Image (spheres, rainbow, N blue to C red):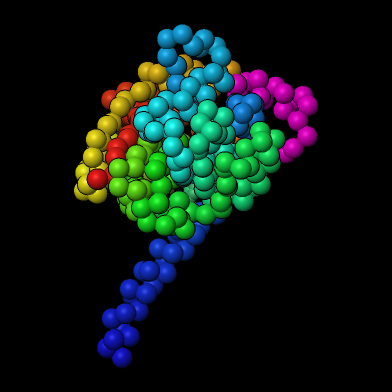
């Protein structure tokens, strides 16, 4: 009786955490299943991220900036791609980054993982069209709990997906990256992070809460907490690079893309504008507002080597 009285609250707490995790996953799946097809109006190659501008790229050419972000991520991995290498894309969306890698590096063996069954099917069919099925495998699953063996990968990337991991230090995801990388293996995370905590009230807090809700996020990572977790996990060569100004030109495309998309949908759209589709238009606009609060928010490349 005593034992039962002691364990029951713990069991309940454990069960409620499991239920919360489950409903969080269901929210993400529902959001990406309903809003996913609209990403085509952002990127013809289905890059589900912002772009990276550098000198020499036309800032009006969005796709070139989106592909340049893929290029930068591979560059930061500093892989010896003369030899075969195994890379996992954690939160791979429709697999655009791995397809970019497969074209550039014939020695690449890529594994993309996403929670969303619809994305798995679409990514597989896009891989078939690009003749990349030999070099890319797409897997449905949770990137915090993958089936990859310990110490099995040369490289791991997570582009605008780390924000979905729990907590402000994203430790579930970082622990998994640490487990699956080979010693000496490299990782790159590309994402938006908070530079310092927001107050409980006020305009920015309200923008932030709406952004999280409309993108099916619980919370953004804190760049300081993420760095400190990486140090605890004994990663080496940790580099935290604020690339907000390189990302800004692609963010500036958001209002034009949204207006063009809405006009097209209102005139010719056949699918109902669901809440998820409206949210998918609202969230990048809110990112523009939050992104202009430079003291609180930044877009970063976070990279390191497993010790
Ligand atoms: C904004 S999209 C980015 C997709 C892709 N990295 C890109 O840049 O094109 C976020 C992705 O994270 C994935 N994701 C979120 N939480 C996840 C989890 N726990 N496990 C696996 N994938 C997850 C979503 O399914 C979605 O594919």
- Which residue: 36% across, 39% down? 187
Looking at the image, the residue that sits furthest to the front is 83
Please state which of residues 87 and 177 is positioned toward the viewer in this rendering. 87
Q: Residue 202 magenta-drawn? A: no
In the displayed structure, does residue 263 sit left or right of residue 109? right
Q: What percent of the width, then of the height, locates residue 169?
A: 30, 45
* Residue 192, quarter of picture: top left
Coordinates of residue 90 in the picture (x, y in percent): 46, 45
Q: In the image, what residue occupies the spot 34% across and 39% down?
A: 186
Magenta-colored segment: predominant secondary structure: helix
Please say whether residue 270 is one of the residues in the magenta stretch.
Answer: yes
Q: Is residue 294 visible?
A: yes
Task: Tell which residue pokes out farthest to the bottom in this image.
Answer: 1
The quarter of the picture where the C terminus appears is top left
The residue lying at 40 percent from left, 27 percent from top is 75
Question: At which x and y percent is residue 70?
Answer: 48, 28
Location of residue 235 with respect to 70 vertically, above or below? below
Quarter holding residue 276: top right
In this picture, residue 217 sits left or right of residue 128: left
31 is higher (above) or lower (below) than 267:
below
Q: Nearer the viewer, residue 16 or 97?
A: 97
Q: Of residues 235 and 4, which is closer to you in this image?
A: 235
**Which quadrant: the N terminus?**
bottom left
What count of labels does the image hold?
Answer: 0
Residue 284 visible somewhere in the drawing: no
Over which residues does the magenta segment extend? 257-273
Where residue 306 sits, quadrant-wise, is top left
Q: Is residue 83 above or below residue 164?
A: above
Q: Nearer the viewer, residue 158 or 132?
A: 132
At a point 57% along the width and 41% down the height, the residue shown is 135
């Amino acid at each position: 009786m005593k034992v039962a009285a002691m364990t029951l609250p713990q069991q309940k707490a454990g069960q409620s955490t499991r239920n919360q995790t489950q409903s969080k996953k269901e929210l993400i799946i529902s959001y990406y299943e309903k809003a996913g097809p609209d990403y085509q109006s952002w990127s013809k190659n289905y890059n589900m991220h912002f772009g990276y501008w550098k000198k020499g790229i036309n800032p009006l050419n969005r796709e070139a900036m989106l592909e340049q972000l893929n290029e930068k991520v591979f560059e930061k991995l500093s892989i010896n791609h003369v030899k075969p290498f195994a890379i996992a894309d954690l939160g791979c969306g429709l697999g655009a980054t791995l397809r970019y890698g497969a074209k550039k590096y014939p020695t690449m063996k890529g594994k993309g993982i996403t929670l969303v069954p619809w994305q798995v099917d679409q990514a597989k069919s896009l891989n078939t069209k690009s003749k990349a099925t030999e070099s890319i495998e797409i897997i449905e699953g949770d990137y915090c709990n993958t089936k990859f063996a310990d110490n099995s990968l040369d490289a791991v990337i997570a582009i605008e997906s780390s924000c979905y991991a729990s907590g402000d230090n994203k430790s579930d995801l970082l622990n998994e990256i640490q487990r699956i990388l080979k010693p000496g293996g490299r990782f790159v995370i590309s994402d938006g992070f908070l530079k310092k905590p927001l107050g409980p009230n006020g305009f920015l807090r309200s923008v932030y809460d709406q952004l999280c809700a409309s993108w099916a996020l619980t919370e953004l990572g804190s760049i300081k907490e993420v760095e400190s977790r990486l140090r605890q996990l004994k990663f080496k060569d940790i580099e935290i690079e604020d690339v907000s100004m390189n990302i800004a030109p692609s963010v500036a495309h958001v209002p034009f893309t949204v207006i063009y998309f809405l006009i097209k949908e209102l005139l010719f759209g056949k699918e109902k504008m669901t809440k998820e589709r409206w949210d998918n238009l609202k969230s990048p606009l809110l990112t523009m507002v939050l992104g202009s609060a430079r003291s609180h928010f930044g877009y970063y490349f976070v990279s390191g080597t497993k010790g």
